[in-house]
């Protein structure tokens, strides 16, 4: 079975409270984008994880795909499988790529072996692998809260809008990014702002990681400004960086604008 785990962007990200368990409560809109990895799962004599494409730090056994397999195998009688991951989504990029790989492994195992695990149960398995993982089970626009692993439907459609993602190759881990911020309650309900036209989002739909990360890495701030200069109706950093995105009303090819960075562009669904 071949599946294509996709990335997400965060449209707004308020870090509202530091929790007793060391995590942070956030408020964010997660929106899927079609920058994808490819994951092939086939029955084998022994369990094996291999990857190609972008090099993933760590050994195969701590890959989130392997962890997802082990988690499901601890409750269900699974045969050994060969997992082959072709890694395209930049890592430490605020795009949730590793989390998506984990969630898609759960979904694929469920389908391949007819496990009939309910969506709710798949979400609770995913949650155990990382805060971002749960979103990718349903994989549709959502307002996320708590650790980012609880969500509700949001009536937001950016279908047909053009999006450009620019990744400058700076690796920022979630833990590093959260360590640098001070949580504070949000000024305005994100769900309410997102009901207003996209042209009113600039300066209102904020990512709380930008303040600290833009002063540490000025390049990130420059990329965001450039996205506005070339006509984005809204631009922001995604998650804990280092990817910036711009949303445009029409197709805009920015590969020549950012020749030294990874650029992904396409329509939103
Ligand atoms: C920045 C986001 O991508 C926004 O969507 C996520 O909040 C990050 O989620 P993630 O990478 O799946 O994070 P996890 O793997 O669960 O946690 C990694 C580390 O990030 C920090 N962390 C993560 C999520 C959260 N709500 N609060 C945190 O403080 C914790 O130090 C944690 O040990
Ligand atoms: N399938 C995977 N893809 C990417 N990273 C993985 C994967 N499995 C495990 N990891 C580990 O997770 C780390 C990346 O996690 P991190 O949360 O920083 O980035 P991410 O998953 O790309 O997305 P985000 O920046 O949005 O959280 C890597 O350094 C690697 O050690």
Image: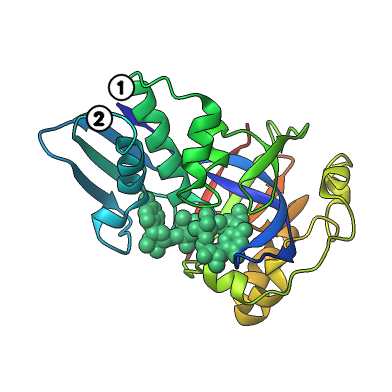
Residue 59 visible somewhere in the drawing: yes
Q: Earlier in the sequence, mark 2 or mark 1?
A: 2
Number of the label disc, if any, that sits on residue 148: none
Q: Residues within 10 Å of mark 1 (few under 14, many from 20)?
A: few
Q: Is residue 211 above or below residue 106?
A: below
Q: Position of residue 119 (x, y in %)?
A: 53, 27
Check the picture and name the quadrant holding the N terminus. Answer: top left
Q: Nearer the viewer, mark 2 or mark 1?
A: 2
The residue positioned farthest toward the bottom in the image shown: 216
The image quadrant that residue 134 belongs to is top right
Q: CA distance from mark 2 to mark 1?
A: 8 Å
Percent position of residue 82, x then y? 20, 37
Q: Secondary structure at mark 2?
A: loop
Q: Residue at x 25, y 40 (%)?
A: 83
Closer to the camera in the image, 178 or 229: 178
User: How many circles with numbers are drawn on the protein?
Assistant: 2
Mark yes or no: residue 241 visible: no
Q: Quadrant of residue 39?
A: top left
Asked if labels 1 and 2 touch by Cβ distance under 8 angstroms, the answer is yes
Give me the residue at 33% from left, 56% from top.
54
Residue pictured at 40% horizontal, 35% vertical: 106
Q: Which residue is located at x 82 percent, y 49 percent?
A: 190
Classify mark 1: helix, strand or loop.
loop
- Residue 224 position, x and y percent, is 68, 64
In the picture of the structure, the residue carrying the numbered disc 1 is 113
Look at the picture and state if 36 lies above or below 12.
above
Label 2, residues with CA under 10 Å away: few <14, some 14-19, many ≥20:
some
Tell me if 32 is positioned left or right of 48 in this view. Answer: right
Quadrant (top left, top right, bottom left, bottom right) of the C terminus: top right
Kindly identify which residue carries mark 2. 78
């Amino acid at each position: 079975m071949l599946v294509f785990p996709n990335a997400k962007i965060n449209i707004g990200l308020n870090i509202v409270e530091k929790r007793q368990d060391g995590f942070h409560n956030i408020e964010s809109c997660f929106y899927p984008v079609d920058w994808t990895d490819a994951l092939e799962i086939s029955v084998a004599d022994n369990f094996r994880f291999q990857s190609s494409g972008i090099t993933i730090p760590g050994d195969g056994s701590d890959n989130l795909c392997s962890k997802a397999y082990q988690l499901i195998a601890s409750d269900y009688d699974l045969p050994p499988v060969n997992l082959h991951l072709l890694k395209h989504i930049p890592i430490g990029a605020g795009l949730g790529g590793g989390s998506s790989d984990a969630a898609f492994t759960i979904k694929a195992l469920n389908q391949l072996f007819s496990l009939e695990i309910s969506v709710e149960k798949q979400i609770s398995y995913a949650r155990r692998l990382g805060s971002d993982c749960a979103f990718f089970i349903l994989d549709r626009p959502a307002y996320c809260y708590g650790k980012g692993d609880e969500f509700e439907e949001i009536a937001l459609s950016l279908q047909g809008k053009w999006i450009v993602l620019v990744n400058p190759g700076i690796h920022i881990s979630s833990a590093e990014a959260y360590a640098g911020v001070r949580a504070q309650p949000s000024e305005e309900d994100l769900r309410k702002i997102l009901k207003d036209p996209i042209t009113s989002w600039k300066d209102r739909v904020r990512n709380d990681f930008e303040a600290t990360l833009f002063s540490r890495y000025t390049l990130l701030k420059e990329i965001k400004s450039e996205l506005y200069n070339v006509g984005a109706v809204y631009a922001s950093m995604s998650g804990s960086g280092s990817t910036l995105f711009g949303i445009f009303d029409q197709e805009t090819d920015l590969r020549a604008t950012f020749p030294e960075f990874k650029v992904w562009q396409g329509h939103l669904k």
